Image (cartoon, rainbow, N blue to C red):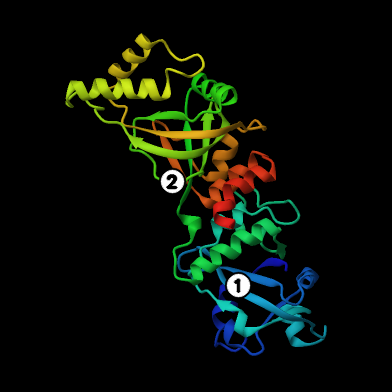
């Protein structure tokens, strides 16, 4: 089975050929001037994307399950207006999605079979002028999200899926050296509330102006006694717990006196999250490049930010990680 994405004008989707709407016409047919449309065949799928003029948002407005292909006579009004190439859909297995399924973030995350993803910051409408065929990986992601949307769930594309955080280069080196030498989970200290993520969610660590490390999320914890107003005994007990559990036995840990001084001077270590499976990003990826892909300004003073599925997919792709690595993080979604 193959899948492709085609753009349809909102007016054509809403009104169709006779004013009743695209999905009201029988037989249910999509026409195009592009011969690429006939890369699809029986049992393939065509996903239709449109931009709503009311809110200027892109949506997957429908999915067509292809029953057969058709060639419109070149001198026919239909061919002159919409194109010679057509696919006729199986109405029972095709679906009108209206505005249930936001499309923009996923479209920017997909790689497409040409290995030419939509460029960072590119206009989506222009980027979708050509019928685009999905990779099997893109197709699986889209199919699973479609099932969830069709079942009434909020698209996972808009929910927290991964994490972005930052640290000094000294700590990035410390994390990597310890994982490579000990293969033991490591704690990332935070001044923020603990993040809530699925087990093995991707954690992208930025350091020294570049995306440096990728890790797997294991758990998060509140740190008791993070304020001076809390019982001093509780603060001391918590400081020792963190030291013994997550610092003392690591490679090149800080001196105990330095750790105590750091802890007592901060008055704000509120949480931690635990990571493992650290790998170094193989490609130098500066924030000015990948931040543009995420449509972020640099998060000054922010301990972490959640990443959606689409943003996580974009970073995994931009980092040029092996496909096996990317799939290991997407496997909870892909099954």
Task: Indicate whether 263 appears above or below 14.
Answer: above
Using the numbered discs, state the Cα–Cα distance from disc 1 to disc 2 in whole angstroms. Answer: 38 Å
> Image check: 186 left or right of 226?
right
Task: Indicate whether 304 appears above or below 131.
Answer: above
Residue denoted by label 2: 197
Instruction: Kindly indicate the quadrant of the structure image that contains residue 27.
Output: bottom right
Label whose residue precedes the other's in the sequence (1 or 2):
1
Q: Residue at x 41, y 10 (%)?
A: 255
Q: Residue at x 61, y 79 (%)?
A: 94
Q: Residue at x 26, y 22 (%)?
A: 237
> Image check: 181 left or right of 223?
right
Q: Position of residue 221 (x, y in %)?
A: 35, 36
> Image check: 15 left or right of 83?
left
Q: What is the crowding at mark 2: few (fewer than 14 residues within 10 Å), some, or many (at least 20)?
A: some
Q: Position of residue 23 (x, y in %)?
A: 58, 83
Residue 297 visible within the image: no
* SS class, disc 2: loop
Q: Which mark is residue 334?
A: none
Residue denoted by label 1: 9
Q: State the residue in front, 244 or 112.
A: 244
Q: State the residue in front, 12 or 281.
A: 281
Residue 104 visible within the image: yes
Q: Position of residue 235 (x, y in %)?
A: 24, 23
Q: Quadrant of the N terminus?
A: bottom right
> Image check: 35 left or right of 232?
right
């Amino acid at each position: 089975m193959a899948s492709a994405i085609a753009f349809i004008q909102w007016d054509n989707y809403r009104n169709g050929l006779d004013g009743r709407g695209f999905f009201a016409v029988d037989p249910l047919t999509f026409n195009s001037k592009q011969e690429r449309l006939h890369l699809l065949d029986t049992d393939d799928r065509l996903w239709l994307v449109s931009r709503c003029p009311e809110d200027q948002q892109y949506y997957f407005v429908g999915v067509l399950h292809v029953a057969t292909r058709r060639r419109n006579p070149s001198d026919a009004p239909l061919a002159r207006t919409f194109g010679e190439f057509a696919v006729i859909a199986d109405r029972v297995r095709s679906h009108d999605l209206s505005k249930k399924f936001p499309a923009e973030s996923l479209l920017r995350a997909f790689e497409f079979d040409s290995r030419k993803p939509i460029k960072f910051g590119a206009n989506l409408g222009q980027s979708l002028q050509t019928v685009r065929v999905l990779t099997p990986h893109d197709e699986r992601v889209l199919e699973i999200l479609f099932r969830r949307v069709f079942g009434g769930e909020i698209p996972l594309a808009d929910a927290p899926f991964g994490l972005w955080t930052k640290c000094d280069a000294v700590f990035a080196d410390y994390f990597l050296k310890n994982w490579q030498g000990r293969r033991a989970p490591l704690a990332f200290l935070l001044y923020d509330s603990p993040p809530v993520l699925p087990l093995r969610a991707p954690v992208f660590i930025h350091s020294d102006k570049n995306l440096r490390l990728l890790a797997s999320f294991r758990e998060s914890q509140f740190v008791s006694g993070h304020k001076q107003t809390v019982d001093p005994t509780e603060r001391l007990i918590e400081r020792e717990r963190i030291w013994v559990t997550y610092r003392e036995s690591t490679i090149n840990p800080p001196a105990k006196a330095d750790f105590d001084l750091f802890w007592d001077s901060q008055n704000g270590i509120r949480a931690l999250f635990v990571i493992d499976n650290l790998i170094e990003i193989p490609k130098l990826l500066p924030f000015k490049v990948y931040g543009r892909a995420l449509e972020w300004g640099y998060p000054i003073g922010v301990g972490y930010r959640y990443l959606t599925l689409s943003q996580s997919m974009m970073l995994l792709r931009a980092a040029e990680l092996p496909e096996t690595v990317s799939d290991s993080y997407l496997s909870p979604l892909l099954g």
